[in-house]
Amino acid sequence: MSIASKYDPSQTEAKWYAYWMEHKLFSSKVDPSKEPYTIVIPPPNVTGVLHMGHMLNNTIQDVLIRRARMQGKNACWVPGTDHASIATETKVVQLLKEKGIDKKDISREEFLTHAWEWKEKYGGIILEQLKKLGASCDWDRTAFTMDAGLSDAVITVFVDLYRKGKIYRGIRMVNWDPKGQTALSDDEVITKEIASKLYYIKYQIEGETDQYLTIATTRPETIMADVAICINPNDPRFTHLKGKKAIIPLINRAIPIIEDEYVDMEFGTGCLKVTPAHDINDYELGLKHKLEVIDILNDNGTLNEKAEILVGEDRFIARKKIGKLIDEIGQLEKIEDYKSNVGHSERTDAVIEPKLSLQWFLKMDEITKPAFSSVMEDIIQLHPPKFKNMYRAWMENVRDWCISRQLWWGHQIPAFHLPNGEFVVAKTAEEALEMARKEYDSSYTMEDLKQDEDVLDTWFSSWLWPISVFDTEVFSTGKPNEELKYYYPTNDLVTAPEILFFWVARMIIAGYEYMGEKPFKNVYLTGIVRDKQGRKMSKSLGNSPDPLELIAQYGADGVRTGMLFSSPAGNDLPFDEKLVEQGRNFANKIWNAFRLVKGWEIDPKLEGSENKASIAWFENRFQEALEEINDHFEKFRISDALMSTYKLVWDDFCSWYLEMIKPAYQQPIDQATYDRTIVFFEDILKLLHPFMPFLSEEIWHQIKERSVEESLILSTWPDQHSFDKKITEEANQVFEVVSQVRNLRASKGMSPKEALDLSINAKSPELYNRFAAVLRKLANLSSLNFSEKVDNAMSFVVKSDECFIPMGDSINIEEEKANLQKEIEYTKGFLTSVMKKLSNERFVAGAPAQVVENEKKKQADAEAKIKALEESLAKLG
């Protein structure tokens, strides 16, 4: 088989993905003889296209699933999409508007027809894009949160929780999105600090023409909804106003002046206008003092008739106009610049309005308790564990979940309203009618039932995801099917910290409520992908590259490794295109190493005994690296696992091992060394496969022809064997000698082709004898000797061994002394830093024993080196 001179990802990736798909190598079936390993994909919005966050998240999932598959586990990665009520409805409304259709002018059924058409046309885009990345999902299991079975499960759960008394309907202050025209849960509100204005408005005291009370507010447009002015009873400035009334400017309505210690005497003017309909804190104050509630805003954020003035104006335009009108009547004292924290809709970015609204809620006080303790007790582990504090804070302060949304796209709430003002909750209209007849009026007909207009919050469907993707009937039967019994609980969840509460916590709640068991064992929380300036990547900022263009330019393997080079769990990834360029260069390095090996001619008559030490070293080094890599994986240090693999391949295999055993130009290699090298290469490909699936599979099949069953994706992860750390330490010492000889050549302008004599004052000459062939070859030595002193020689120290290279009469003693002195100072500085670490009691007590032992070894080596360098210096006089 001829090997291309350059690796071409575009040819390789399409070929191997089609091969894996054709032979269903991603598929998983229940198999009691194998241990299941399951990941459910965080379902991306059906409206979505691949962005950098998806790339990072799904690369990590694919790394985990591919490694588990190679470990012999029954790997099952379930893909799917979320119906994303608000985002999808916004898209469809916009699409209809472009066609000249207003949502208000069509029926719900007509709108849903358009929405489903949109979903069928555009809804699968992101999943197709994930295939370009190499995602090895079981595509036959692709789920959608509004599939018939999954939808039925959502409705069943709503009815069940309602009948358990955990869901209720009531008027509460909610977060209102005027753009999406729907309620939002607290978790869907993003708080941003924005520049605003603080308006100081004078309210006249009733019956006193020249006496005013000044109120500072950022929302003058809501003064028409004021129902009281509140002062702190302990504030001496306002004692004379107790029991009096103030008059609202412009509309001249008198409102009482009330007292409450809630008022911060230090903020603004020390008194507060109370607007219960438009502020959550004012609402609580209003309940306490039994105040009237006046809502002056329409659902779209415009002023309604209750405002009395500026009816129909947008709230922000009204704000400026009110400020101007109050100024014109002389009751605007001043305006100050002010920074305020303002809630924005996570989906539409509209400024949130606190609004009293009749909504459906899920009681969260009791249902959250198992989910709270399971994470606190590490039954479910968060990686990194620092997120436990965030989780605790949310769970300890959880509020009832507003689960209704004023939309048409989604799961319509199964509540049926009756002519008598009551409602019944049932899975179907037929069941509802039967209940209504039994409970209220036996003469009711289907026409008397009106299903609730609202749909359920999208998260109310996706919180069932780890269960419903395997079994949609368990919620009604209480008996899990074979798939759910086998695959649940799932193993690892990979997601972003910003949906720790939206989704992760709620899946845990649902898992304990319906399965009595955790939904997953580990939660790996990725960081946010940011640009070089530290900004979150987004379309609006124009700072995010197109992931598919990156794949086209650098190859999927290059992008995957580039994303993972600097993305430790929970920490943000400062993305730089140089990272994916490094990934591509890594792919090219591996390809060139393969071409080098396959280009060697084999002579079966050769013995190859000079390569035994090199082979023994790499066997040990591979096992040492494998132990590191396995440990990183077990601790979810995926980035570290990649870096250990990268160093093993680039440094140890390519830079050292292949150079050590490479035959001379146009000379053959012995069969034994070649065969062992191919085995090493195959083991390396296994380690690379989770990170670089396409390149590794391509080389795997180019090494020799293999059947489908022998594909790398199905091969076995390398076994861990014991290794001799002493061999790798000795080899590192030899490599240091080689590097020092090379540095010396460079500093003296010597040709690499000029063979040199090397003498070593060695404590263990047998160490160098074992690697004599390597030393001669890599350092280009004409001879290797052992001697305590060599005259007229350049010297350097490795560990405590002094090495000499005779220079005849050309040696400069003073220059040599200066170099030795410089090396002594450097090594002393290094020793100081090591000693500082070892004298730190917290470090010694808290670090792993191996790490402390390594530091002590560094101390001993540095001390021995300083001693040898000082002896060398003394010899020069």
Image (cartoon, grey):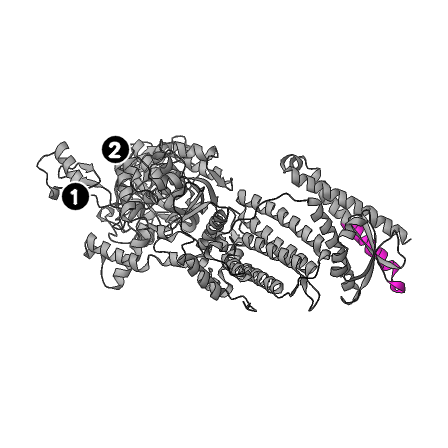
- Tell me the quarter of the image containing the N terminus: bottom right
Task: Tell me if 583 is positioned left or right of 53 in this view.
Answer: right
User: What stretch of residues is rendered in magenta?
Assistant: 804-826
Question: Could you tell whether 349 is left or right of 307 in the image?
Answer: right
In percent of width and height, residue 338 lies at: 43, 48
Secondary structure, mark 1, is strand
**Residue 742 rendering spot, x and y as whole percentages:** 75, 61
| Whether residue 130 is visible | no
Amino acid identity at mark 1: Lys
The residue carrying mark 2 is 163
User: Does the magenta portion include 812?
Assistant: yes
- Tell me the residue that label 1 is attached to: 450
Q: Residues within 10 Å of mark 2 (few under 14, many from 20)?
A: few
Residue 823 image label: none
Numbered marks: total? 2
Q: Which secondary structure, mark 2? A: helix
Whole-percent x, y for residue 244 in the image? 30, 34
Relative to 230, 267 lies left or right: right
Q: Amino acid at mark 2?
A: Arg
